[in-house]
Image: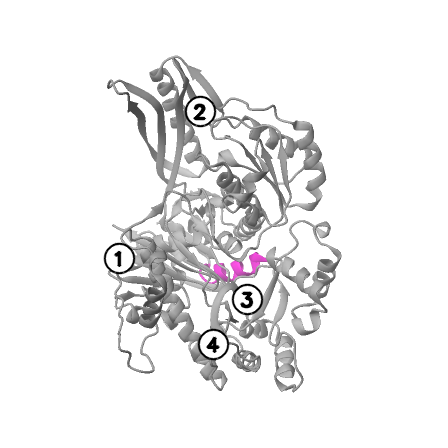
Amino acid sequence: MPLFLGLDTGGTYTDAVLFDPAKGVLAAAKSLTTKHDLSLGLKGAIEGVLDCADEDVAMVGLSTTLATNAIVEGHASPICLLLAGYEPTALDRAGLRQALGSDPVIFIAGGHDPQGDEQRPLDLDAAAAAIRAQAPKVAAFAISGYFSVRNPGHEIQLRRLVRELTDLPVSCGHELTSKLDAPRRALTCALNARLIPQLQQLVRAVLGLLSERGIKAPLMVVKGDGSLIEAALAMETPVETILSGPAASVVGAHYLSGEADVFVVDMGGTTSDVALLAGGRPVLNRDGATVGGFRTMVEAVGVHTFGLGGDSEVRQDEGDLVVGPRRVMPLSLLAHQHPGALSVLREQAGSSDPIRHPGEFAIRQRPLDAGQASLNPAQTALWNRLGDGPQPLAGLLSGPSALRALGRLVDRGLVLMSGFTPSDAAHILGLQEGWSGEAAALGARLFLRGGTRGDWRPAGDAAGFAAQVVEQVVRQSGQVILSSAIADDDAIAERDWGGLGRRLVGRALAGEPARVPLVAVQLRLTRPLVAIGAPVAAYYPEVARRLHTRLVIPPHAEVSNAVGAVAAGIVQTAEALITQPSEGLFRLHLATGIEDFSELESAAERATAAVQGQADAQARRAGAGEFQVSLSRKDKTVREKGGLPIFIESRIAATAFGRPRLAR
């Protein structure tokens, strides 16, 4: 019987499982994710489950939260976005300007109209000049043409030009979605380009380790809809791996728990992800996944992602104790890996002098993605200082300019901050072990010395403060579950609560009040909770109690993502659109361009053959062995007052379903 190797690379841990399709999980292991060199964490996890059975591995599945985390935390590689035929006002739609930040945007004459006809000739000379100027400063290019889903010709020409002038990755909007809404398509394309260098680093690390062990099995990557694609294709379209980790976790949660109609919550180091299982299948968001406040055009599991995890930053916000949404390295982990940090914490805790940024550090997270030219002098100076290991902010920051430079390095995901987290609180309370409990306690003392603002009243010692942090995680986790349930319930909307509703919900999630109120509130979730992820045992029994629902933490819950990475299958869909620009003319819009016909059925026959061939090719490129293709056609018409039908459009789709090819 062939064996499957499942891998999941998260923000904190890398997981591995050895999976037998007949017997289930044979072995499981966890290793810390090492973002400066992903192969180190991967190697530790793989060695924990593999011995001499390497030659029996027939397939390797990989899921990852790196794409999701990069968007949630605002960490991404610098890109240049080329917009053909767009007006500058497009940047103010779909959050495009916010998503791009300081990355360059080049507007180029070109684009098409809704019928697929060229609205202006493409200005290739201006494009070439922009590509040459921006190539040394960016890690990838993104290309979006106006109405490119009706005619991708200009995007294809610009992609060819980028490849002629540079060796950088390039992403085109028409390859990622066939839906209208140009700014949102440009946003999706930009996010895809930003993620290419990071996913390439991960995939190459996995392939290198498999090669070292003589494993010749195909490497598959989990998409956001829970299906699989071959690694080479995933590196070209990494935006499709947005919510890869949550999708894999839902697939794995169903397999491990046997539950069919539940909420699944996956709590990791960086995020909490909530999804709905209906009839054993993940409910998909057909309109596009929303991650980090950005609504993409990626069809994915209908998951709600929140910046709340075991490694979320504990901070004060307007006088309240808040956890997240930014991930930082726990002080207990920092001192465990870098003992010199413990000496700094001891010195800061023993000092009676005021300290700026007490208990806070910065550390390099991963290598430069676009070379030294992408850093300004202030950023370069900080980057070089961090080459010697983690540095306390008290000695690293000399003024506002240094703080801004550090913020930019953090935004790009090159540098990681370290501070107090729920993982530190768990070490203090004995809920977690393995890292430096002393560093966690020192960090708590330093946090308490920082003073308070507003209504929050800190505990008097480290243990009391740690209990306050755990309580805050429980409350915010309950809010996460409740917000997700309300978002999926058409009968109620969170925006309609008003101040009273929010206070009553907050009272219900607060558990036992200090005094008996005149109005008591209880919440009941009508579906059970399946909780997976390493930290859930510390928080979710109490969350489920306050939501009055049944909790299931299945066996191997801590590696559910890795299980889902080998339990999924391959699904690939190709679509074609037929429109009628004028009487007697039927226009077929394909991924390769437009074709005109005088009869609808002739266009439909050509469309059917095209999408069937495209779905077949996509399935094979995605790594499918045996698969089946199903066809669908939806004609849209309206009727005149006299009852005569008027043709609007026809959509013809082919979907291939199958399992990955296995090594022989």
Q: Is residue 196 above or below residue 513?
A: above
Say whether residue 362 is left or right of residue 571: right
Query: SS at mark 4?
Result: helix
- Magenta range: 37-51
Query: SS at mark 1?
Result: loop
Say what amino acid the circle numbered 2 marks. His
Q: Label 2: which residue?
A: 589
Residue 46 drawn in magenta: yes
User: How far separated are the C-alphas under marks 1 and 4?
Assistant: 32 Å
Q: Label 1: which residue?
A: 259
607 or 397: nearer the eye?
A: 397
User: How far separated are the C-alphas under marks 3 and 1?
Assistant: 34 Å
Say whether residue 413 is left or right of residue 377: left
Q: Label 4: which residue?
A: 425
Q: Is residue 418 above or below residue 51?
A: below
The percent position of residue 422, horizontal first and vertical second, equals 47, 72
Report the magenta stretch's main SS: helix
Disc nearer the start of the sequence (4/2): 4
Disc nearer the start of the sequence (1/4): 1
Residue drawn at (60%, 57%) of the image: 411
Query: SS at mark 3?
Result: loop
